[in-house]
Amino acid sequence: MEKLIVKVLAIGESSRKIQEEFLKTEGPKIVEVAVLAKEVILKGGKILIFGNGGSAADAQHLAAELVNRFKKERKPLPAIALTTDTSILTAVSNDYDFSQVFVKQILALGKKGDLALGISTSGNSPNVIEGLKTAKELGLYTVGLTGGTGGKMKPWCDHLIVVPSQDTPRIQEGHLLFLHLFSELLEDLIFS
């Protein structure tokens, strides 16, 4: 039992240090992205969010915070998680390729001046990269949320936010911190 307590404390301390470093290095970028999102929304645009696995859950989490509310009672904000429609996801995967599941939706729903947020802990998910590439080519603003070195998504991101870790659970914890900071900043920017 004592070993498990020591392990929990060590993991907690590792997470704290990574998040502290994340805020120091990426905090200004998070503010820039929130300001950009405000401008996109005030000009009638929307936020398209996508990722795989835990990152798909993060996409849905962020869309829920923006469409419903985070901390303030307010009007809904236009955000769509591209990870939720199983018929679209399976049709595109079956008829084309899994790397196209976000591409097709961005082509259908995105317009110049919208914001595309791709989430990948490694930065190397082919369907997230293809989604960001398509978004950039269509004139959407592109934001990547990742970890490690940023991976192969880097060239397709106008803004790249990187959790300074190679450990997937610690990266995901940093992503959750981003989701909440971004949501709170965006509410403050638009509704204060």
Image (tube, rainbow, N blue to C red):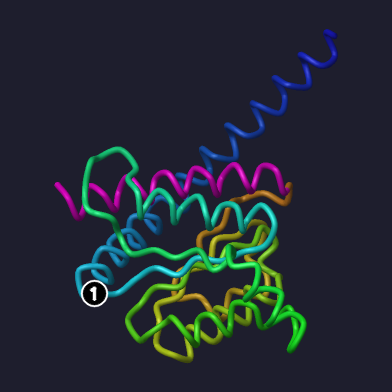
Q: Is residue 167 left or right of residue 20?
A: right
The residue shown at (66%, 42%) is: 170
Q: Is residue 114 left or right of residue 133?
A: left
Where residue 3 sits, quadrant-wise, is top right
Q: Position of residue 39 (x, y in %)?
A: 24, 69
Q: Does the magenta stretch include residue 64?
A: no
Q: Is residue 171 magenta?
A: yes
Q: Nearer the viewer, residue 156 or 191?
A: 191
**Main secondary structure along the magenta-highlighted residues:** helix
Q: Is residue 73 left or right of residue 99?
A: left
Q: Give the range drawn in magenta.
A: 168-192
Disc 1 packing (10 Å; few <14; some 14–19; many ≥20): few
Q: In this view, does 151 lie to the left or right of 66?
A: right
The residue shown at (46%, 49%) is: 179
Q: Is residue 191 above or below residue 144?
A: above
Amino acid type, mark 1: Gly
Q: Mark 1 points at which residue?
A: 44
Find numbered disc 1 in the image and state the secondary structure of the residue it sits on.
Answer: loop
Q: Where is residue 17 in the image (x, y as percent from the top left)?
A: 59, 34
